[in-house]
Image (cartoon, rainbow, N blue to C red):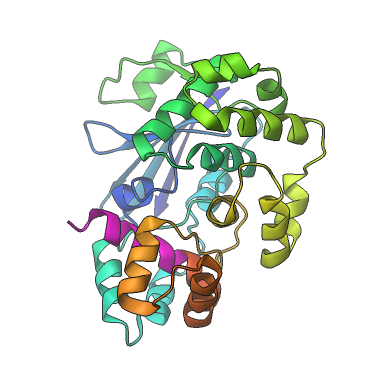
Amino acid sequence: MKFETVKLVQKDCFNLKDIFECGQCFRWTQEEDGSYTGIVKIGVLNISYIKDEIMVKGYVEDKTSLKEFVIDYLDLNKDYKNIQKEISTNDSVMKDAIRFGNGIRILNQDSWEMLISFIISAANNIPRISKCINNISKEYGKKVVIPQDIQNKLFKFGKKENTFYLFPSAKELSKATMEELRDCNLGFRDKYVLKSAQLVSNKKINLNEIEELEYKTAKKELVNIDGVGSKVADCILLFSMKKSEAFPVDTWIKKIMNEIYIDSQNVKKINDYAYKKWGLNSGIAQQYLFNYMRNKS
């Protein structure tokens, strides 16, 4: 592991709170100085944003390029300002949603982690999802202990915690028993988590191959996995497979879509409407709407 820092300038459509608290990720926490600390595939990151400058500090795997990872992870090469204009034309509700969460960007996360995270998300809330993910990471993931000298560089605000756990690989998680997973408080989802771990570990499911498929075919492959329905599949596709047309439909989205856009409880009809209205930016539109509906009150 190595300590590395990266500075990037970002002037448009970027806000850490909007990004990390809009429901797309579960292992990022805000620190007392306003920065966010996250556990990602390559290690532990701390990100702050002051005066258009993104400062990223990381204790990461030796062979990784932190700059390349961050640019992709934070979706910095995408023109969100132009996307906002496109999806909000003649749409006052979308304009309000964008103003409310102007700094949202879709994170490009690890597909294996997203598969398990969103299986766990079924009939669950965000704090509990985060706790479940942290539980299985602590039990089965790689332990990362940050040396004191690096900890002082990584967390200038004096964070005391120096031990973190990376999300376990499919092979690591497949070694769990149902009883052990039950102790991680996964509830009825434990059997789906274990089966997915076994299938991915045994290469009966190849997430990289699924990612290469076009959206509809990729979604069909994902919903064949036990515990993955339409909404969970769309979350995986949007948050880890760069399928920006994916439009996850949950209770919040049904509510705002029914109130404003389409009078239907049918998920496929809502999906089809979203694609017709917002096209390849449907998933980004969804995040603005979801964040707005969930937090505006």
Quadrant for residue 62, please give it: top right
Placement of 174 over or under 72, stated as above or below: above
Q: Is residue 253 shown above or below 125?
A: below
| Residue 147 lies within the magenta run | no
Q: Is residue 1 left or right of residue 187?
A: right
Q: Residue, x 51% and y 36% (percent of image)?
A: 120
Residue 171 at x, y percent in the picture: 73, 25
Q: Residue furthest left?
A: 297
Q: Does 113 sit left or right of 216 as displayed?
A: left
* Displayed quadrant of residue 220: bottom right
Q: Is 67 situated above or below 255? A: above
Residue, x 35% and y 58% (percent of image)?
A: 252
Residue span colored magenta: 284-297
Against 68, residue 86 (above or below) is: below
Residue extending farthest bottom: 90
Q: How many marks?
A: 0
127, 229: nearer the viewer: 229
Q: Quadrant of residue 119?
A: top right
Residue 223 in the figure: left or right of residue 14: right
Whether residue 63 is visible here, answered yes or no, is yes
Position of the C terminus by quadrant: bottom left
Residue at image location 34% in from the left, 37% down from the top: 36
Residue at image coords 52%, 74%: 269
- Residue 165 appears anywhere in the view: no
Between 58 and 117, the one lying in front of the other is 117
Quadrant (top left, top right, bottom left, bottom right) of the N terminus: top right
Q: Position of residue 29 (x, y in %)?
A: 34, 34
Give the dominant element type of the magenta stretch: helix, strand or loop. helix
Q: Position of residue 27 (x, y in %)?
A: 43, 34
Asked if the magenta segment contains residue 296, the reply would be yes
The x and y percentages for residue 209 are 78, 51
